[in-house]
């Protein structure tokens, strides 16, 4: 059994590495096939040849792009190990993601500066989602098909159909323009997280509410519920201690699968509220300023976070359900 | 209700030039932030453009992107998925074990953002990016279906009659395996409309004067507009919510209809 477990673990790690390798390769490939000279586009048309050469040397642009290159004059040519692709990988292993094309700051430093803000936002959104979904889902599930259930299910459907970029500005309109409780943008004050977290958590809470509801309904039909009731437990205890614990297992899986949606949604949420996270860094500093090294780094870090979060969910899932843990 | 939204949306998209009351890009700075009137049914935006007309043409963009993306990505997904399910072995190991997992293990919208960032914003690139992230859902469904159907007796019978692999796959297995794809396509339509609006909202979709719903929302979310003319924000918001709701409803309904196990509940 131990051997099987190790094998499974190795498989998982292997797949993770494959995914990261593919993602980095795709992004690097896309940067390299773009027409135009990076040095000229970064420094402008008026840069002197010395400046251009210097820029190329700093960013490794004087090296060939890949192991193999092709030109009409020479055909295929083997470039050896000293190429941009291999060097980028060597950098990653040392935690170095290269230097920004604009301003020459190390990309890893820029990302580390913004990373905590995004994680904070994602965790806050997750908490909002769970705080809404569990009581609402239990309420709907225990009141199956009556008015309370319909109301909760309607809310869930609404949440699923309203995209982040509708919920966000709507909350701004309600709480910043009409009632002036929160400031519309920024991430300076501690209460500034409230609106972004609700925005990002709304869709997730809707999906989770549906899951909790159907899970509770299913579990309520099980034999152990009858046993628990027969031994005189209060309905509250039956639901929250027995039903919910078993019913949460599928919910955790969905939670893990939704983390990607959360991270992608974070990019939009950060833009709406000017939240200084990774998404805003990617949009404002990377994409708008054509800083390809920074785009490369942001995409890499966001995808690795996503993959790690998924694997973590898998672990929690195993811990929650002993049947899976033992098999 | 959802069927109504659906029909209204399609008719609006087809007959957009006749329904729209104004030129979608015509600016009229004197008429900025006009409230809904008989002249401008849904009011005007920050540049004095008619919100109703822009919404009508926006429906066309949404639907166009949705239909093309669903058609192309379900076609590609069907082929790759069937090949994985039909041939099995190493082919399946590579396709479903590696390729599917890579695309599933990666936040789709991020990949689309990266693609558009490198290739430049525009309608064709947007559609390309959404197809790149969209095909894998269909491929996974088709693989599972083909795996199931290829074990049926009529496949054995066709093989005994000497039919080629291609003939078995395309004339015997596919028609019997394609049903769940319809559900996936309907939900995929909602996803594509949403992704288009998201990318346009981020300024990575269809460039500015074109009236995409995402672009309209992005332009209307400024504090000036929310202060002085919130309707400029609310009309496209309602349009997109209703559209996504309708496609999700249809997808859910189809799933229940096609799955007798769920229909009983």
Image: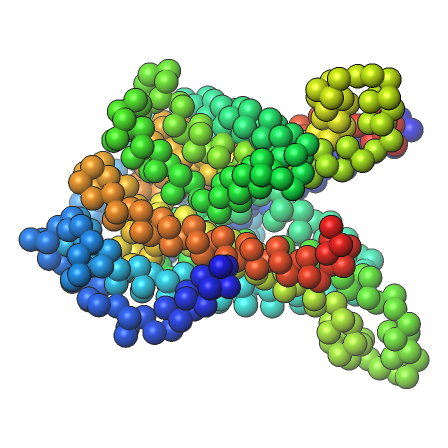
The colour mode here is rainbow
Q: Residue at x 60, y 68 (%)?
A: B75
Q: Residue at x 25, y 63 (%)?
A: B53
User: Seen from this angle, which residue lies furthest left?
Assistant: B30
> Would you say A104 lies left or right of B245 here?
left
Near-viewer residue (A71 or B246): B246
Relative vertical location of residue A202 with respect to residue A162 in this rendering, above or below: above
Q: Residue at x 88, y 83 (%)?
A: B162
Q: x%, y% of residue A3?
A: 89, 29
User: Seen from this angle, which residue lies furthest front?
Assistant: A147
Q: Residue at x 82, y 22 (%)?
A: A229
Residue B79 visible at all: yes
Q: x%, y% of residue B101?
A: 67, 47
Residue A27 visible at all: no
Asked where in the image residue A163 lies, by quadrant, the reply is top left
> Would you say A16 lies left or right of B49 here?
right
User: Seen from this angle, which residue lies furthest bottom?
Assistant: B161
Near-viewer residue (A151 or A268): A151
Q: x%, y% of residue B148?
A: 82, 61
Asked where in the image residue A166 lies, by quadrant, the reply is top left
Near-viewer residue (A87 or A273): A273
Asked where in the image residue A288 lies, by quadrant, the reply is top left
Number of marks present in the image shown: 0
Q: x%, y% of residue A211?
A: 65, 38
> Would you say A303 lies left or right of A5 here?
left
Near-viewer residue (A155 or A90): A155
């Amino acid at each position: 059994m131990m051997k099987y477990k190790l094998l499974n673990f190795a498989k998982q790690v292997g797949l993770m590495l494959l995914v990261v390798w593919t993602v980095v390769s795709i992004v690097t490939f896309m940067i390299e096939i773009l027409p135009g000279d990076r040095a000229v586009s970064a420094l402008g048309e008026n840069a002197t040849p010395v400046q251009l050469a210097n820029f190329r040397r700093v960013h490794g642009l004087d090296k060939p792009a890949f192991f193999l290159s092709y030109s009409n004059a020479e055909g295929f040519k083997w470039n050896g190990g000293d190429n941009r692709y291999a060097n980028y990988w060597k950098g990653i292993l040392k935690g170095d993601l290269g230097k920004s094309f604009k301003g020459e700051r190390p990309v890893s430093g820029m990302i580390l500066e913004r990373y905590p803000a995004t994680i904070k936002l994602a965790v806050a959104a997750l908490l909002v989602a769970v705080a809404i979904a569990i009581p609402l889902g239990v309420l709907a599930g225990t009141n199956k098909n009556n008015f309370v259930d319909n109301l909760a299910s309607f809310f869930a459907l609404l949440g699923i159909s309203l995209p982040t970029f509708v919920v966000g500005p709507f909350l701004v309109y309600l709480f910043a323009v009409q009632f002036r409780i929160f400031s519309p943008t920024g991430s300076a004050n501690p209460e500034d997280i409230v609106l972004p977290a609700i925005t990002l958590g709304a869709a997730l809470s809707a999906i989770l509410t549906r899951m909790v509801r159907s899970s509770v309904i299913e579990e309520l039909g099980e034999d152990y519920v009858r046993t628990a009731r027969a031994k005189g437990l209060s309905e509250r205890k039956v639901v929250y201690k027995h039903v919910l614990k078993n019913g949460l297992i599928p919910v955790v899986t969905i939670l893990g699968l939704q983390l990607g949606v959360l991270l992608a949604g974070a990019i939009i949420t950060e833009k709406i509220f000017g939240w200084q996270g990774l998404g805003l860094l990617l949009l404002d500093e990377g994409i708008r300023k054509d800083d390809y090294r920074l785009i490369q780094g942001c995409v890499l870090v966001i995808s690795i976070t996503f993959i790690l979060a998924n694997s973590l969910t898998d672990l929690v899932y195993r811990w929650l359900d002993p049947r899976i843990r033992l098999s | 209700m959802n069927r109504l939204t659906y029909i209204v949306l399609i008719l609006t998209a087809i007959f957009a030039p006749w329904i729209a009351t104004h030129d979608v890009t015509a600016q009229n700075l004197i008429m900025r932030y006009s409230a809904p009137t008989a002249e401008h049914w849904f009011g005007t935006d920050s540049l004095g453009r008619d919100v109703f007309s822009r919404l009508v043409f926006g429906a066309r963009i949404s639907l166009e992107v949705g239909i093309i993306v669903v058609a192309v990505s379900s076609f590609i997904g069907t082929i790759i998925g069937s090949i994985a399910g039909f041939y099995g072995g190493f082919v399946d190991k590579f396709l479903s074990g590696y390729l599917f997992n890579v695309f599933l293990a990666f936040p789709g919208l991020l990949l689309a953002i990266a693609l558009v960032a490198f290739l430049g914003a525009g309608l064709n690139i947007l559609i390309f990016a959404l197809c790149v992230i969209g095909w894998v859902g269909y491929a996974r469904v088709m693989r599972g279906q083909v795996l199931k159907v290829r074990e049926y007796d009529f496949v054995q019978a066709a093989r005994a009659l000497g039919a080629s692999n291609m003939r078995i796959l395309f004339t015997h297995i596919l028609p019997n395996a394609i049903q769940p794809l319809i559900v996936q396509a309907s939900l995929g339509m909602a996803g594509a409309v949403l992704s288009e609006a998201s990318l346009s909202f981020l300024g990575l979709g269809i460039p500015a004067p074109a009236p995409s719903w995402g672009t309209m929302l992005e332009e209307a979310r400024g504090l000036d507009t929310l202060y002085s003319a919130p309707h400029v924000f609310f009309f496209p918001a309602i349009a997109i919510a209703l559209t996504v709701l309708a496609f999700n409803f249809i997808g859910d309904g189809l799933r229940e209809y096609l799955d007798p196990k769920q229909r009983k509940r």
